[in-house]
Image (cartoon, rainbow, N blue to C red):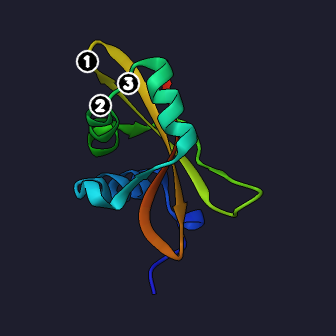
Amino acid sequence: MSQPFQRKTKLQLQRHIREVARNSAAVFVTVHAKQRMAQRKVLLNEVLECLRQGVIHLEPEADLKTGDLICRMERYVCGRNLAACVALDDDDPDLIVVTVLVL
């Protein structure tokens, strides 16, 4: 069995997110994230680029409700700095985009 996400380094998590995001079918966007994307005029392609080529600067945090690990991927896309926060669940290989920010 692979190492739990909580024990992985930022670099290992970044690599995992980039790899999974290569398959857009494995990236799910929550209703909240879709609302923020519309509010901030961010397209899905921009979010995918952020996940596929972004970096994790901040320490990932555990979601106290779900136990998921929340990682914030950041990237300069289309003339602005974006961040996409994804939830990682040890039991689910997919990425769940929980919110999108314009920094």
Which residue is depicted at the point 30% across and 51% down? 18
Residue that sits furthest to the top in the current view: 79
Q: Are marks 2 and 1 in contact (CB under 8 Å)?
A: yes
Q: Locate residue 31: give its quadrant.
A: top right
From the top left corner, tell me how far across and down residue 78 is, in percent. 25, 18
Q: What kind of residue is marked 1?
A: Cys
- CA separation in Å, label 2 and label 1: 8 Å
Q: Are marks 3 and 2 in contact (CB under 8 Å)?
A: yes
Q: Which one is in front, 73 or 8?
A: 73
Identify residue for label 2: 46
Horizontal side of 83 relative to 64 (left or right) equals left
Which residue is depicted at the point 70% across and 54% down? 63
- Where disc 1 sits, the SS reads loop
Determine crowd level at label 1: few under 14, some 14-19, many 20+ residues with C-alpha closer than 10 A: few
Horizontal side of 47 relative to 31 (left or right) equals left
- Where disc 2 sits, the SS reads helix
Residue that sits furthest to the right in the current view: 64
Identify residue for label 1: 78
Sequence-wise, the earlier of marks 3 and 1 is 3
Determine crowd level at label 3: few under 14, some 14-19, many 20+ residues with C-alpha closer than 10 A: some
> Does residue 11 appear anywhere in the picture?
yes
